[in-house]
Image (spheres, coloured by chain):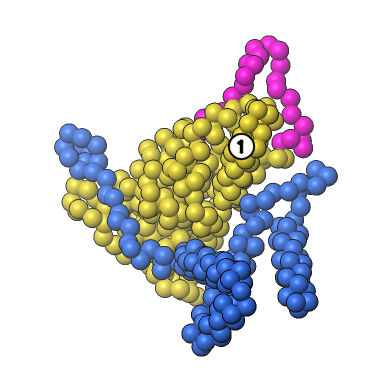
Amino acid sequence: MAETITLTVSRYRPEQESEPTFQSYDVPYDEDWVILDALNYVKDQLDGSLTFRWSCRMGVCGSCGMMVNGTPKLTCAIPLSDYVSSGPIRIEPLQFFPVVRDLVVDMNGFLGKLSSVKPWIIRDDETPPTEGEYLQTPAELDVYKQFSMCINCMLCYSACPVVGLEPEFTGPAAIALAQRYNLDSRDQGAAERMAVLNEHEGMWGCTFVGECTEVCPKNVDPAAAIQLYKMASATDWFKSVLLPRGSK
Amino acid sequence: MSVQTGSPSGPPELYHRPMSFWWWLQKRAYFNFILRELTCVFVGVFAVITILQIRALSQGPDAYAEFINRLRTPGFILFNTVGLAALLFHAITWFKAVPTTMIVRFGGTRVPDQVIAGLHYVGWMVVSVVVAWILLLR
């Protein structure tokens, strides 16, 4: 069994280089470690200047997403042992995002896209909290629960070539989040969100590569959310053509 | 301790990674996606050939016979062989994707993906048998 394992890590220090370079670190191999443990070893023992995001270490906060050997991964959820026999592990910041420093990417564009789809319950008839909650049955919860499991880790954006080719594309997580609220029995904002997403930069930018669903650590299936959205839009359009008076 | 940034007075200078023209060779899934999209050209060409065949049929027996003879040339046979393979790839990859686009609930539970995809294959077979039956009856 290997005693050490090599991490080849992308470094970008804007004050000293104009584009990223790679730096290698040998870290002890521990079969109980995940990739994030190895990065923290580098940070604590070898090079305190290495910069990366992390927080919960349990696949919930979505902070530690990085490219591991070219694939977007949550580094707190991937054992080192998965890579021990395949040579140095190449670690880079999530692709298709601007790099702030080393493994840290700029999230501002992503956060703007998330808020653009109005990810909150919209009501035509808002009732005061004193009148109680908007009730929902377990079956109604089940309809959207899958799409509510997103942790905003951005792996899906990093897997989607459309995001790289068309930076204005709203992207998988935001559209899945919109669908989560559309399918919520308490929500009445589907038409408002449709107005935002029924654009080329919205749902129609998706060419259905499907990799967003493949890399999602929470099985949200954003590709399904987007295709369902397209179906809903197409159905609305046909209704408006065939039943111009009765579609509303 | 001072924090250094790309420019002394502003926010850090972001690095925008360029996207390679060859991005679709980066992963098998990307390559399969491009292949799925490109094979739609063969679907379109087959449709055009069928329309031309119907036009030849409407022009009388001689025109139709001439059209069929042209289809029997080695070039067309080669094209049809490659085209059929591309068309099958296109159809099968879309059938694989269908369960993602159709979430059907029956009696409160979601119909399994295999059932959705399987029903599409059954539909394809039924249509193929009907078309073959019509052609063989001619």
Counting from the top left corner in percent of width and height, residue A14 is at 22, 48
**Three-letter amino acid code at the position of disc 1:** Val
Q: Residue at 38% across / 49% down in the picture?
A: A166
Q: Which residue range is magenta in the image?
A: A117-141
Q: Residue furthest left?
A: B8
- In this rendering, the answer to whether B44 lies above or below A157 is below
Q: Is residue A158 visible?
A: no
Q: Nearer the viewer, residue A177 or B47?
A: B47
* Residue A61 pos. (x, y %): 51, 42
Q: Which residue is under mark 1?
A: A241
Chain for disc number 1: A
Q: Quadrant of residue B46?
A: bottom right
Write the residue at 73% across / 48% down: B104
Residue A167 image point, x, y percent: 37, 46
Q: Residues within 10 Å of mark 1 (few under 14, many from 20)?
A: few
Q: Colour of chain B?
A: blue
Is disc 1 placed on a helix, strand or loop? helix
The yellow-tinted chain is A
